Image (spheres, rainbow, N blue to C red):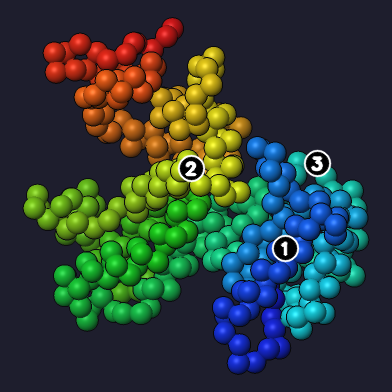
């Protein structure tokens, strides 16, 4: 994977115009006549690039010849548009268990990211076998930056409560939605929020007036309605799964569906990825990436609290899965469908 940024000598150009020109680069990279070998997804489709504004990720087959071809396409694009590669953002990630047996990159200006290290793409740290501590550190740094905006001692309790939910915690939800944080990170986040909520200065500690378990409860039952970072992150990961199983096509959705199919009931027939995952109560495979394990754990937790609405029409009954639906009963107490097969 090649992560890069572009800078341009154009003046008085709006971002929309730049995006129209950058779209040409995507078509150039996908043009089979140019010979760039892209990354193959589990469903057999291929993707060469991920673009957002002036940040570009190239997903390429890891050969020296393929990298040369891709760099030639970039050179042609830069010559035609007067754009330039930002060498300070030109980073390559070798995302493979097989060792890289070629090293020629110095003349291309590429810096290879070491295994376990990370770089930043769209504000989120990325890397191969990235150290979880690096991802946690990014979240804590983001949260600490927001602490410097306002002093808690200048605000009322209501004001600090609003800052906690709408500013402090809101600044990390994006990172939490695309990465799995450790238990230690959530503990630090709760500590930072608790100190701010009870009026402590930056880098200082104070005694909480009520426990965290009470602080996250609704105001109607005596709580403060503070968002719990661990629970909110779990909900965001579940939303990622929900979006990934929606009908529209996107490269990242292909990866989500692939992981869902790996978790399906063996011998259950040709069910859709959605049905497999909804019916599947067991844990994710041990070889799964940390993010997928976190997504699976989040959905398993929420799945326990889902209210299954009994079917009312004949066609709704026909659409019921025959597995894991023994708890769905009619008004007379008779289960719809069958018990899980053993």
Mark closer to the observer (3, 1): 1
Secondary structure at badge 1 equals: helix
Instruction: Name which of mark 2 and mark 3 comes first in the sequence.
Output: 3
Residue 137 in the image, given as x and y percentages of width and height: 51, 61
Question: In the orientation shown, which residue stands out farthest toward the bottom?
Answer: 12
Instruction: Name which of mark 3 and mark 1 comes first in the sequence.
Output: 1
Q: Which residue is drawn at the image coordinates 85% and 59% (left, top)?
A: 34
- Disc 3 to disc 1, C-alpha distance: 30 Å
- Disc 2 to disc 1, C-alpha distance: 24 Å
Residue 331 can be seen, yes or no: yes
**Where does label 2 land, which residue?**
247
**Where does label 3 land, which residue?**
98
- Disc 2 to disc 3, C-alpha distance: 34 Å
Secondary structure at badge 2 equals: loop
**Where does label 1 land, which residue?**
27
Image quarter in which the C terminus is found: top left
Residue 180 in the image, given as x and y percentages of width and height: 49, 48
């Amino acid at each position: 994977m090649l992560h890069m940024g572009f800078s341009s000598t154009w003046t008085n150009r709006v971002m929309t115009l730049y995006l129209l020109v950058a779209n040409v680069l995507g078509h150039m990279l996908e043009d089979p006549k140019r010979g760039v070998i892209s990354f193959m997804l589990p469903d057999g489709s291929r993707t060469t690039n991920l673009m957002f504004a002036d940040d570009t990720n190239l997903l390429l087959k890891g050969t020296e010849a393929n990298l040369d071809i891709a760099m030639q396409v970039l050179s042609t694009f830069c010559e035609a548009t007067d754009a330039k590669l930002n060498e300070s953002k030109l980073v390559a990630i070798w995302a493979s268990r097989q060792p890289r047996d070629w090293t020629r990159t110095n003349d291309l200006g590429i810096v290879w990211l070491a295994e376990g290290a990370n770089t930043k793409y769209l504000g989120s740290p990325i890397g191969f076998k990235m150290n979880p501590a690096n991802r946690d550190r990014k979240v804590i740094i983001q949260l600490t930056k927001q602490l410097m905006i306002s002093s808690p001692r200048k605000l009322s309790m209501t004001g600090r409560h609003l800052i906690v939910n709408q500013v402090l915690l809101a600044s990390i939800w994006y990172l939490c939605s695309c990465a799995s944080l450790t238990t230690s990170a959530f503990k630090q986040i709760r500590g930072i929020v608790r100190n701010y909520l009870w009026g402590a200065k930056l880098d200082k500690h104070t005694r909480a007036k009520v426990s965290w378990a009470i602080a996250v409860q609704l105001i109607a039952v005596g709580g403060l309605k503070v968002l719990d970072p661990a629970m909110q992150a779990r909900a965001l990961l579940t939303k990622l799964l929900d979006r990934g199983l929606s009908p529209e096509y996107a490269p990242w959705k292909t990866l989500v569906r692939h992981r869902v199919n790996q978790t399906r009931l063996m011998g259950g027939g040709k069910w859709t990825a959605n049905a497999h995952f909804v019916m599947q109560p067991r844990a994710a495979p041990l070889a799964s990436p940390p993010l997928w394990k976190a997504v699976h754990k989040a959905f398993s937790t929420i799945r326990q609290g889902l209210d299954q609405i009994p079917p009312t029409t004949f066609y709704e009954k026909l659409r019921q899965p025959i597995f894991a639906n023994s708890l769905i009963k009619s008004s007379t107490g008779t289960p719809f469908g069958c018990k899980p097969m053993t």
